[in-house]
Amino acid sequence: MMQQQQQTGDGIPDLAQLQSTMHAIELACSSVQMHINPAAAEATILSLNQSPQPYKACQFILENSQMGMAKFQAAAAIRDAAIREWSLLTSDDKRSLISFCLCYVMQHAGSPEGYVLAKVSSVAAQLMKRGWIDFTAAEKETFFYQINQAILGIHGVDVQFSGVNFLESLVSEFSPSTSTAMGLPREFHEQCRMLLEKDYVKTFYCWAQNAAASVTRRITDSNTEVPEVKVCTAALRLMLQILNWDFRYNTTGTKGGRNAFLPGVRGHSSPKKSDCTIVQPGPAWCDVLISSGHVGWLLGLYATLREKFSRGGYWLDCPLAVSARKLIIQFCSLTGTIFLSDDGQMQEHHLLQLLSGIIQWIDPPDAISQAIEDGKSESELLDGCRALLSIATVTNPIVLDNLLKSIRPFGTLAFLSTLMCQVIKVLLTKNCEEGTWSWEARDILLDTWTTLLVDSTGGTELLPPEGINAAASLFALIVDSELRVASTSAMRDDDDDDLYYLQASITAMDERLNSYAFIARAAIDVAIPLLTRLFLERFAALHQGRGIVDPTPTLEELYSLLLITGHVLADEGEGETPLVPNTIQTHFLDTVEADKHPVVVLSISIINFSQQSLDPEMRASVFSPRLMEAVIWFLARWSRTYLLSEEIRDSTLNSGYQQQQQHSRKALLSFFGETYQGKFVLDIIVRISVTTLLSYPGEKDLQDSWRELANAFANEQTFFLLNSSNQRSLAQTLVLSASGMGNLGASNQYVRNLMGHMTKYLVELSNKRDLKNVAQQPDVILQVSCLLERLRGAASASEPRTQRALYEMGLSVMNPILVLLEVYKHESAVVYLLLKFVVDLVDGQISYLESQETAVVVDFCMRLLQLYSSHNIGKISLSLSSSLLSEAKTEQYKDLRALLQLLSSLCSKDLVDFSSDSVETPGTNISEVVYFGLHIVTPLISLELLKYPKLCHDYFSLLSHLLEVYPETVAQLNNEAFGHVLGTLDFGLRHQDTEVVNMCLSALKALASYHYKERGAGKTGLGSHASGVEDSSGNMQEGILSRFLQLLMQLLLFEDYSPDLVGPAADALFPLILCEQVLYQKLANELIERQTNPTLRSRMASALQSLTSANQLSSTLDRMNYQRFRKNVNNFLIEVRGFLRTI
């Protein structure tokens, strides 16, 4: 063991002073943890850091204190003081500080306070780097001799683990991307990095390799986890860290950066979502990494443990398994001069050895994907996909394809196609969302194909015959899947803002479509005829089904086909005229006649179809604006490459082409050239473009016909023959058109004239003495339904220019609406329309209304809710809800959803208010009507019903609004109702929809911050709801804030969620911690105690400390502190979530 040296200053404090200092720091740390006068406590700790030469006191604290956090702060003070005073310290002082830290780490290697050891180890690494340039080789060797002795395991497993961890800290400190700031120039860090790489990095790798090998037998022979596991895991992690080093100085024996064009490296800039790090350590590393059998040992270790623990699904995600797989993946990226100049034989053998082990993780794809769906971890399959991407990055398609043939009856490309086909099938059958394993695997495999197929010039690599067949099969499945998605999307319900899919931009899909194009071009002989056949089938289906079947699914399929085909046939060009893709030029060599060339046949088919848009009848019945967008986009992209191409003149000058290639190329380019069909096609494209523009004429040309349409809609009975959605859409469109009129008065008068006859009819109908009899007549029900749809459309078109007229429209029918609700209480369809009209009216008007008008609307809503409640309309039994298995049956819940939307709209008044006066008047009690509505709605919402997406979204939207605007209203609910609300919040936090979870987090933030602020003002806040109450059985129930604090900590640390939720979760967690500080401290201590690995325990304690204290965080709930806490949470999760999720 290393001998401790202590000579760090002239003054020697007496024992009483040292103990006094230690007690002061312990008290300060305790105060910080308990949030008792944290400012004074932090000042005490800071004084230790800033005091001159505090080394004796800090060493005394480290050796004698019983409080881990005090020791942590003492180590930090040594670091800060030493870096600050480095130039003032003697050589002996510097060596003594480093020796003390190393001795401390080794002597206390078995300590449960891992975070203290990690801190001291980090301090030693930083001080060693600070003096690296000044220390002699002998001084460095003295330090590393002791480290090597520890890593050899001479002093036991704990010391061995600490030695490996120290090297990990040292390598991290010397890497510029992870080094600690020291106030020194960049050149200092670069020089340290150069010297370490030159003299020690390879040595460290060998030490880690030996450490892992020394404990392998003990691990494989044991049926339970043994202490040696942590040594092996740490060693593998260190080896991975070293292979991630950005080698610069030993790659070719001279200083130089990484050369992306070294043999075996595919240097291109293709669009990729996934990426891998190329490893090029140079020829000096060949003996350690290649010829030593190290790769075989690593694969054998993983395979042995994998087989041994195959029944324990958890093993795949344990730290040892994860570290081993990551290291294996990194070996797949090994390339450059480390391999001998033997025509790639050594590298091929290396990759084959790796692939032989990796194939077990991903083959057979169907069985593995099914196992994942049944609960097996997906991590091994995803790592297998990443390994394939890494191999593809350092080799070419032919070499890659041959690798698998030596151990399987098929090539690697065929397997890659099979694997991706299986992933796509899972995506289709499971309707997987972004963030799922199949989605991630699809992206990685697409990147693998892109990496393989794009050469260094941006062209497409040639594949072997089996590879072409594999690419063809894959492309066919890709197109089929895209067409299914397009067809399905066309049938979505358009009643509740589900049209977002139709607005998806071509640019947003460009990256994925480019990858599809590379795959298609690899099998161009199959892809072009396939696309031609699919287009012709869709064209025929449109003509055969005109006037008989809904064309929307077919139109959506054509939209997708146009996008895919446009990317296959032509490139973007990026400012230059794009050439015909090389694979298209060099294929179809047996084609001599221009009009028979497959690309010409496909292009002409699309142009002929597009030309039909010139026919007004076809344009009206087939060519939607969305389809025309794709048509124009395709023609623009296609014409830049093929139309009147100048390339045909250049092609005759290139004598290097074979005669057959020249004829085929000439046939393709000449067909759309100036002397053949080019001018004719150009004329068609111009006419299509002009017609498209003229299909949207200007305001002046439309005014007369628009007035005629508006007058007919308001007065003629024939328009009642339109279906309900068309009634609503036409009313909305006509009202929106008022915004383009010359002045405010004209706009409002236009709306009054348009809607006046309709409101008058409803008023007159509601005043009839025999209304109950008249209202039940079928023609009256139909007319009332049509008028309500029109009122809905008009109300949803509310804008500032027409707001006054629309408010008057709503005001005039308020009493009739209540009368009709009474009359039609047994007609659920009419009740739904009445409620939806009120929802649209309130949503469009509430933010503009003055206080008196708001009072009128609120009073009307209260009467509406009371009437609805008195008839118990829409009440649903929980036993019935569980039997709802189809979307059609959920129609009976639309009135419930409408009530949710109505209450949300009322809540929004306090968030968005454009009125000129305050709504805080005695006659404007929005909270009262919301409170009443909540009592109506809450009992009807079951967890079973919340499984229906639209209802779920509306409910949590209301809850989020309600708690943000009227938290005191929820606090007044009785225990049963309040418990029901919290039960749904618990459900929502575990929901798969990110937006739902986000709304629940907003609701929690509002609830906790309300309680914290109320308690700070001396009020009760949530009262018994926060402290806990007895249930019906007399058992004490946990308080809601403590319950959700634990739930949120569990979610953030251990469960899967979108990264977009971290910020909202932090906003909810901050006030929850402030409300439940004692519980939070208990949870924090439990997290620390759960870490059996000393390093992880250290990291956890340090991260928890920073979570609530870093960035000058205070206990005030203001915008600045929320931002600070968000930053703290991000840093906290980066630090601890990885190892918590793998334990």
Image (cartoon, rainbow, N blue to C red):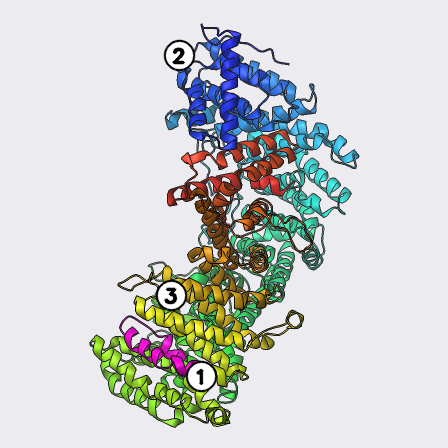
Tell me the element at label 1.
Answer: helix
Q: In the image, what residue type sits under mark 2?
A: Leu
Circles 2 and 1 in contact, beta carbons < 8 Å: no
The residue indicated by pointer 3 is 652
Number of callouts? 3
- Nearer the observer: mark 2 or 1; the answer is 1
Q: Residue at x 56, y 32 (%)?
A: 1101
Q: Is residue 1031 magenta?
A: no
Name the mark on residue 819.
Answer: 1
**Closer to viewer: mark 3 or mark 2:** 2
Is residue 338 shown above or below 479?
A: above
Q: Amino acid at mark 3?
A: Thr
| Residue at point 54%, 26% (across, down) | 69
Are the residues flagged by discs 3 and 2 in contact, CB closer than 8 Å? Answer: no
State how far apart marks 2 and 1 are (Cα). Answer: 91 Å
Q: Nearer the viewer, mark 3 or mark 1?
A: 1
Tell me the CA gap for discs 3 and 2: 78 Å
The majority secondary structure of the magenta stretch comes to: helix
Reply yes or no: does residue 815 show up in magenta.
yes
What residue type is disc 1 on? Val
Front position in the image: 1136 or 512:
1136
Tell me if I can see residue 31 in this picture: yes
Cα separation between marks 3 and 1: 84 Å
Image quadrant in which the C terminus is located: top right
Residue range highlighted in magenta:
790-819
**Residue toward you, 1047 or 325:** 1047
- The local crowd at label 2, few if under 14, some if 14 to 19, many if 20 or more residues have their Cα within 10 Å, is few
**Label at residue 1099:** none
Mark positioned earlier in the residue sequence (3 or 2): 2
Contact check, label 3 and label 1, Cβ < 8 Å: no
Write down the residue under mark 2.
88
